[in-house]
Amino acid sequence: MSLIPAKAGIHNASAGALKNGIPAHAGAVAELLNLPPIIGHRGVAAHAPENTLAGFRAARALGCAWVEFDVRLTADGAPVVCHDDQLERTTNGRGRISTLPLSAIRGLDAGSWFSASFAGERIPTLDETLTLCRELGLGANIEIKAEHGRGPKTAVAVAAALSRRAGHLPPILVSSFLAGAVAEFGRLAPSLPRGMLWRKIPRDWRKIAAGLGCATIHVGQDSLTEATVGLIRDAGYPVLAYTVNDAARARQLFEWGAASVFSDAPDIIGAAAEGLTGARRGAR
Ligand code: G3P
Ligand code: MG
């Protein structure tokens, strides 16, 4: 797999690449963000329990330079790393994260469901995840998740956590399916790069992305065509496609000009990135 080391610091990420909040050149933005071809999805979800510290360490061990993870709020407003709003699938707990305090969430086992060898893994806080990413040299794509109406509040908590660690952050890219969360994050942390996430690109995507000052566009891989990737790139945005666990599909997306793919199994698709992305990502 192609390894591009993540740079420490983030303020370089958007400076120069964004003009009035609009990226001038997809390749330039990808270069400034130092986006690698493969971003570990939820850590590396095929190899370790998703969204756990063990998963982020496994991602680094597999050669990932960046990881994506999901952040949502506990009942007492703490940002924690978990994909589902419900605890059942990935922990031994029950109920909704948004109804439980951090102390209860931290008592849960988030590893045993995946394998006994991961027993004792916890749902990480955003803060400890950022510490680990920084230690490991991993870039962090923070995806803001929230139940209805809580997107902006979650963005406030994420921005506050990042602000407390200013100067000691790993490379950061914040994204969300929730435009309200991206907007609020952009208002509070305008110098940090942000991207809009869509399962399928909507008709008015240009207007939304420009209005939110997006640096990147993240799209469900199965909705992408060569024409769509070209359209987004031509508008100046790197295309990040989720979730790609098939080498042939990864190769096709890179050939079309995708900057990065999110993968649960970067080891399987690593070979698809070799020799392709370097040429394609910067090329116009
Ligand atoms: O951020 C890309 C991807 O993670 C979005 O979908 O449901 O896996 O969080 P999901
Ligand atoms: Mg996600």
Image: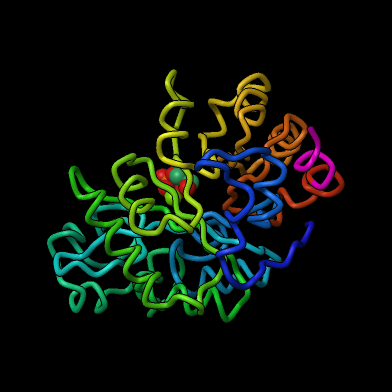
Counting from the top left corner in percent of width and height, residue 199 is at 45, 32
Q: Quadrant of residue 222?
A: top right
Q: In terms of depth relative to the viewer, which is nearer, 63 or 280?
A: 280
Q: In terms of depth relative to the viewer, which is nearer, 134 or 114?
A: 134
Quadrant position of the C terminus in the picture: top right
Q: Is residue 147 left or right of residue 246?
A: left
Q: In terms of depth relative to the viewer, which is nearer, 157 or 211?
A: 211
Q: Is residue 277 left or right of residue 253?
A: right
Check if residue 147 falls in the magenta segment: no
Check if residue 281 falls in the magenta segment: yes
Counting from the top left corner in percent of width and height, residue 98 is at 17, 59
Instruction: Residue at 60%, 42% (x, y): give it.
Output: 244
Instruction: Residue at 51%, 53% (x, y): give it.
Output: 193
Region rendered in magenta: 278-284
Instruction: Residue at 63%, 55% (x, y): give it.
Output: 33
Q: Is residue 96 left or right of residue 253?
A: left
Counting from the top left corner in percent of width and height, residue 109 is at 32, 74
Would you place residue 188 above or below residue 277 in this image? Answer: below
Quadrant position of the N terminus in the picture: bottom right
Would you place residue 44 above or below residue 168 in this image? Answer: above
Counting from the top left corner in percent of width and height, residue 262 is at 58, 48
Magenta stretch mostly in which secondary structure?
Answer: helix
